[in-house]
Image (cartoon, grey):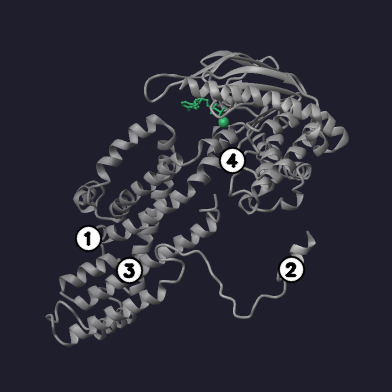
């Protein structure tokens, strides 16, 4: 018995070892960031070349330098009687307050819809009806009902953001395993404890995914919301720049929105990692 | 004492023909008893356990625990599942203390009791770990500790060691014998391993499928012999053990043949 072990080469492995792993599928683990950066550079160069060579009329496509100058002037002097920060913060406040309301309403409604046949029957009708509509379609109603102040803007955004949160929370409840629920019940949980300690945390990953989608929807609805007699806001900035055919400023506005939306999405990913570290771990 | 009286279960099936999963099963589990249910897959073992736990209503018959009818899940009946249903967002100690939290106990008491129970299953060092950091056998031990926390009258276990490798499984069997001996709980334990059934129980029921029935009962004493001598190997190789094993095997095997012929 001991012979077998002693005959085996138990000494240190050879120096030139070749580390292996299972052949993969899809994109694997190697980072895609360098590829993405290279793609961005190529697009930038193509843009610069196309605008410098006057391939398209200057009005349609400003040069990168003009856009950069516009950004600088927006940063320094503001635009349309407001500083850049005032525009951005006005929009951020709208999106964040609408998002907070959408989460505060959407999570309980969605959980309730996942648990009760009546709640699902009642809420399904309005949500399924209005959710596919483009916000621009019911924008006039918002103005007529709520006027041209902040209320109508935030309501419009809230409505657009509510549905994805509610639908995700409902799906989250559905995904809770019966075994987990049974385990909690046989440990003596009442309905409230079951919700707080089992259902809500189980549904949390899907609620966070829904929130991420809602924030994306929020940014894409923002321009529509700020069509309503806004004096500040990054969506308003883009709209008014386009009325003056200031394409370079339109580009700047789009860039600012993109940066904000990206930052939100990044923040959500961090939040997810912090709140649901167990995701994918059974 | 848990009493099952002429319990029948019919499941609705997709093809419209109801499945007779349990046919007038009667069973008494006296205080301190360790009853093991053995049978091939599909003979209604889980159905019986789910009814005892209160997860499943009966088509007819009744289940009572100390004279009170079972009408839903409750803390007086602890359940250990085949696949642990631990909550991944809570630490091992918090999982164990979950039943105490539901009962409204204070933080300090929960903590102390959780450590005590983790010590019982030999996992006190892992109190602060996440469940997904543990091996399958360790998770199952956490599941046992968690089920014991609210101090239930009976422990219901549905193939708790079914997913474990044979070495871990034998260690878990010995651990469970100790838990039983120390806590004096009634245990209802499901397995499809004949050896496990004989080793663990004070009483064995053998079930047969289509419809699920109890076809044989045996009183067992190997568990007490192990508690005394601490020698699992001697118990499992004793002539009485191997002889009974073959008898039970014959019954289970016969079922299997009948079961197939009936399909
Ligand atoms: N939810 C269900 N719906 C329909 N039939 C079921 C359901 N659960 C179990 N059965 C049927 O009842 C019988 C007994 O199942 P089960 O109690 O799970 O067996 P065991 O645990 O002994 O393997 C099987 O024939 C199974 O197909
Ligand atoms: Mg089963």
Tell me if B215 is positioned left or right of B186 in this view: left
The residue at the point 74 percent across, 19 percent down is: B30
Protein chain holding label 2: A
Say which of B6 and B213 sits in front: B213
Mark 1 or 2: the one toward you: 2
Q: Is residue A49 visible?
A: yes
Mark 4 or 1: the one toward you: 4
Say which of A275 and B186 sits in front: B186
Q: Are marks 1 and 2 on the same chain?
A: yes
Protein chain holding label 1: A
The residue at the point 62 percent across, 17 percent down is: B214
Extreme residue in the left direction: A57
Q: Is residue B65 visible?
A: no
Q: Are marks 1 and 3 in contact (CB under 8 Å)?
A: no
Mark 1 or 3: the one toward you: 3
Measured Cα–Cα span from mark 3 to mark 2: 65 Å
Q: Earlier in the sequence, mark 3 or mark 2?
A: 2
Q: Quadrant of ligand 2?
A: top right
Q: Which residue is mark 4?
A: B83
Protein chain holding label 4: B
The residue at the point 32 percent across, 77 percent down is: A40
Measured Cα–Cα span from mark 4 to mark 1: 55 Å
Q: Which residue is mark 2?
A: A7
Q: Which residue is mark 1?
A: A227
Mark 2: give few (<14), some (14-19) or many (20+) Cα within 10 Å: few
Say which of A2 and A55 sits in front: A2
Mark 4: give few (<14), some (14-19) or many (20+) Cα within 10 Å: some
Q: Is residue A22 above or below residue A247?
A: above
Tell me if A277 is positioned left or right of B190 in this view: left
- In what element is the residue under mark 1? loop
């Amino acid at each position: 018995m001991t012979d077998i072990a002693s005959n085996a080469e138990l000494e240190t492995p050879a120096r030139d070892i070749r580390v292996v792993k299972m052949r993969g599928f899809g994109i694997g683990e190697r980072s895609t960031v360098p590829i993405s950066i290279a793609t961005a550079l190529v697009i930038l160069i193509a843009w610069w070349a196309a605008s410098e060579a006057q391939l398209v009329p200057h009005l349609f496509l400003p040069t990168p330098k003009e856009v950069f100058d516009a950004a600088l002037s927006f940063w320094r002097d503001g635009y349309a009687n407001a500083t850049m920060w005032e525009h951005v913060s006005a929009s951020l406040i709208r999106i964040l307050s609408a998002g907070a309301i959408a989460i505060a309403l959407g999570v309980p409604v969605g959980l309730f819809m996942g648990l009760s046949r009546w709640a699902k029957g009642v809420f399904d009708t309005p949500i399924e009806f209005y959710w596919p509509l483009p916000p621009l379609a019911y924008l006039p109603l918002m103005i007529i009902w709520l006027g041209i102040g902040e209320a109508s803007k935030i309501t419009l955004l809230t409505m657009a953001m509510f549905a994805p949160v509610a639908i995700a929370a409902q799906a989250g409840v559905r995904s809770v395993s019966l075994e987990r629920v049974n385990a909690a019940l046989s440990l003596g949980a009442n309905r409230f404890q079951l919700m707080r300690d089992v259902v809500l945390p189980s549904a949390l990953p899907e609620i966070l995914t829904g929130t991420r989608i809602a924030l994306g929807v929020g940014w894409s609805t923002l321009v529509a919301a700020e069509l309503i007699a806004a004096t500040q806001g990054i969506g308003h900035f883009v709209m008014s720049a386009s009325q003056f055919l200031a394409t370079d400023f339109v580009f700047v506005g789009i860039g600012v929105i993109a940066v904000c939306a990206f930052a939100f999405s990044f923040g959500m990913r961090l939040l997810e990692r912090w709140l649901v570290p167990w995701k994918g771990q059974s | 004492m848990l009493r099952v009286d002429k319990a029948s279960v019919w499941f609705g099936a997709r093809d419209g023909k109801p499945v007779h999963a349990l046919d007038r099963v009667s069973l008494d589990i006296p205080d301190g008893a360790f009853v093991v249910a053995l049978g091939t897959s599909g003979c209604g073992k889980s159905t019986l356990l789910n009814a005892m736990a209160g997860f499943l209503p009966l088509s007819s018959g009744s289940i009572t625990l100390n004279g009170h009818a079972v009408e839903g899940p409750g803390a007086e009946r602890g359940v250990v599942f085949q696949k642990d249903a631990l909550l991944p967002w809570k630490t091992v100690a918090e999982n164990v203390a979950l039943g105490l939290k539901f009962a409204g106990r204070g933080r300090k008491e929960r903590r102390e009791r959780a450590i005590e129970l983790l010590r019982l299953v030999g996992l006190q060092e892992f109190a602060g770990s996440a469940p997904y950091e543990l091996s399958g056998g360790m998770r199952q031990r956490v599941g046992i500790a968690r089920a014991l926390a609210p101090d239930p009258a009976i422990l219901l276990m549905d193939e708790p060691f079914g997913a474990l490798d044979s070495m871990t499984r034998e260690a878990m069997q010995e651990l469970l014998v100790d838990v039983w001996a120390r806590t004096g709980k009634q245990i209802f334990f499901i397995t499809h391993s004949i050896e496990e059934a004989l080793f663990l129980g004070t009483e064995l029921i053998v079930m047969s499928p289509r419809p699920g029935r109890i076809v044989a009962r045996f009183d067992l004493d190997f568990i007490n012999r192990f508690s005394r001598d601490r020698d699992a190997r001697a118990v499992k190789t004793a002539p009485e053990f191997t002889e009974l094993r073959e008898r039970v095997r014959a019954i289970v095997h016969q079922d299997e043949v009948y079961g197939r012929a009936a399909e």
